[in-house]
Amino acid sequence: MLANNRVKKLLGIEYPIVQGGMAWVADADLAAAVSNGGGLGIIAAGSMPADVLEQQILKARTLTDKPFGVNIMLLSATADDAIEVVAKNRVSVVTTGAGSPGRVIARLKPLGTIVIPVIASVAQARRVERQGADAVVAEGMEAGGHIGEVTTLVLVPQVADSVGIPVIAAGGVSDARGVVAVFSLGAEGVQVGTRFVCALESNAHQAYKNEIIKARDRSTVVTGMATGHPVRCIQNRLTKEFERLEKSGASIEEIEKLGTGKLRAAVVEGDVDFGSVMAGQSAAMVDRIQPAREIIMELFQGTEEILDILNRNPFR
């Protein structure tokens, strides 16, 4: 399938799918399961100390002999440490978010690392291409966690028309229909996050997974608009408190303090009432726990002929 697909060739994978770099969720177990399933698994460095990240990388290598990557959140206080751990361990792929990837590209590309920034606008896509990015993840605001302001349907074709490197679409993709849709918009791959939270191999707390499975079309809300770093989560007491603070004119510091530690509380401890249950709008389309390989197969089931046609004759 998709013999000439640039994302598959670039990453050395069976299916053009990348697992989202979700902090506290995307660990060695999930990354290895996705890679073994034919996609590109990702370990989220998040705010991990360097030694913990290295342990996760070494563990993944005991679980898979397939390519996998590390996501580096550039605004994290541990980002520079993560870059050096990746360099030391010669990780083959890095995705980046929340900042300019210039220093990642400068440090890691000479070592042969493939660098793929997550972007939320055409301007960002053009900038990272000039900096030397190998591909981009164009993430629409349907996605979970930290988001931009443009929807996937609008963002992906504009980015595809603006850069020469491969475009991987993210935000709202949860089944084969979504895969075909974003390929028709000019993407050559997909990044999926929310659905992989509910993978059998995901170590996210069962309560967190249950909230995703129970979600409906309007279950997610966007918080933190006043801080300039909006986040999409499933609505709960925490999101209502964010809303109250923002409406009351609370300071950015006060709003950000409310969110400190709340993602870990949800993912690790299972606090889905006052924890940050980050999930995309596609949560409404997730209805069960499945092995990662099965999720990947379903995403591409029956799409081979359509995707091959789109790959040869894109609508642009």
Image: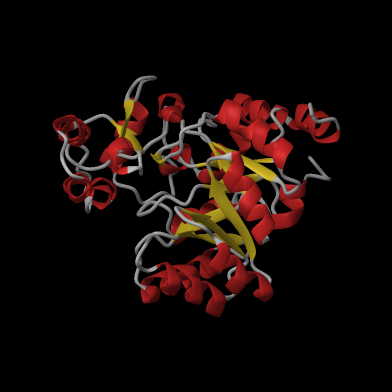
132 lies above or below 80? above
Of 306 and 242, nearer the camera is 242
Kindly indicate the quadrant of the structure image that contains residue 48: bottom left
**Which of the 4 image quarters holds residue 78?**
bottom left
- Spot occupied by residue 178 in the image (x, y as percentages of width and height): 60, 27
Give the side of residue 175 with respect to residue 281, left or right: right
Q: Please, which colouring scheme is shown?
A: secondary structure
Residue at x 35%, y 39% (from the top left corner): 230
What residue lies at 30% left-to-right and 32% top-to-bottom? 234
The answer to whether residue 38 is visible is no
Q: Identify whether 235 is placed above or below 139.
A: above
Q: Is residue 141 visible?
A: yes
Report the side of 236 relative to 109 (left or right).
left
**Given the current orientation, which residue lies at the most extreme right position?**
312
Single out the residue that lies furthest toward the bottom.
88
Q: Quadrant of residue 106?
A: bottom right
Screen quadrant of the N terminus:
top right
Q: Where is residue 110 shown, x and y percent of the image? A: 68, 74
Using residue 102 as the reference point, say whether residue 79 is left or right of it. left
Q: Identify whether 218 is placed above or below 130.
A: above
Query: Looking at the picture, how far across and down is residue 212, in whole percent?
Result: 35, 32
Question: Measuring 72% from the left and 33% from the top, which residue is drawn there?
Answer: 186
